[in-house]
Amino acid sequence: MNAVARLVAPVRLVLTSLLDFFAPWRCMMCHAVLPSDTLWHYICQRCLDRLAPAPTPIELLAHIEQSGDPDECALSFVIARWSASPRQQPGLFDLVHALKYYGYWRIGVELGRELGAAVRLLAPVRYDALVPVPIHPARRRERGYNQAEAIAEGMHEILRIPVWCDAIRRTRYTQSQTRLSAAERRINTRDAFGAGKQAERLRGATVLIVDDVLTTGSTLNSVATAALQLGAARADAATIVVAAT
Ligand SMILES: [Zn+2]
């Protein structure tokens, strides 16, 4: 060990201890102080263990088919990590909300790693790419980033699959879907996606579309439809949470 390295280690230890003391990481769900060596910077192990696992991929696909027109389902396989109700278990949605609207990019990466581990365990095929659900350029200007890309970055760390952000683009500025019915969501997202700058990559590709929340599946289905129309061989989808009603 050289002299600089011998000096850096104790200085780093003192600085981290000071930071832990004055500004510790806290669980966003229960506000407990997190250990300084935590892998998770926004949620404690206790809260993580309490989250309900999502329904199985077969159940999720059936749910999407029931919410829409079964003949129109473009997705072959759908996976999610957790299930939660925005009203009864708001904690997980608080995390997603912080990721989406308050710039907490790292939350997406950390949740994405968990989703990546689930995909590694359960995916029926090897994917050529992860495709984050695109946001409209006007919304990107408002927000500064796309939360689905943060999730894809975390998944990439686990799966080592490339992330394609420019294969598909959002062609319409769609209104927020929170208050819309399943039928309204279908109309709202239909034809909202088209060829991005690098759409030619999709030809013959097997892709996994990535998003934060699955509600009726209309957004994921619209992105999958666009991917298949642009020549993809298969489109599956993965989300962090399924919103139970
Ligand atoms: Zn907690």
Image (cartoon, helix red, strand yellow):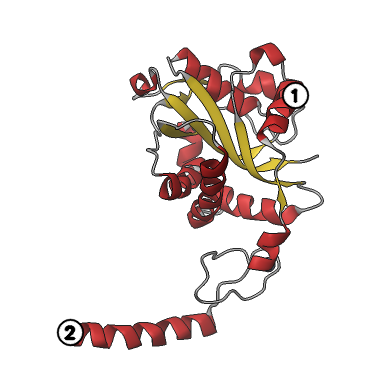
For the C terminus, give its image quadrant: top right
Q: Residue at x 18, y 87 (%)?
A: 3
For the N terminus, give its image quadrant: bottom left
Q: Is residue 19 above or below residue 50?
A: below
Q: Residue at x 59, y 74 (%)?
A: 34
Q: Is residue 25 left or right of residue 72?
A: left
Q: Residue at x 63, y 50 (%)?
A: 97
Disc 2 residue type?
Asn
Image coordinates for residue 122, horizontal then vertical, percent: 57, 39
The residue under label 1 is: 67
Q: Is residue 110 above or below residue 118?
A: below
Disc 1 residue type?
Ser
The residue under label 2 is: 2
Q: Residue at x 73, y 59 (%)?
A: 50
Q: Nearer the viewer, mark 2 or mark 1?
A: 2
Q: Is residue 191 left or right of residue 12?
A: right
Query: 98 and 150: which one is in front?
Result: 150
Q: Exactly how many numbered labels are in the figure?
A: 2
The answer to which quarter of the image holds residue 55 is top right
Query: 53 and 210: which one is in front?
Result: 53
Q: CA distance from mark 2 to mark 1?
A: 63 Å
Crowd class of label 2 (few under 14; some 14 to 19; many from 20; radius 10 Å): few
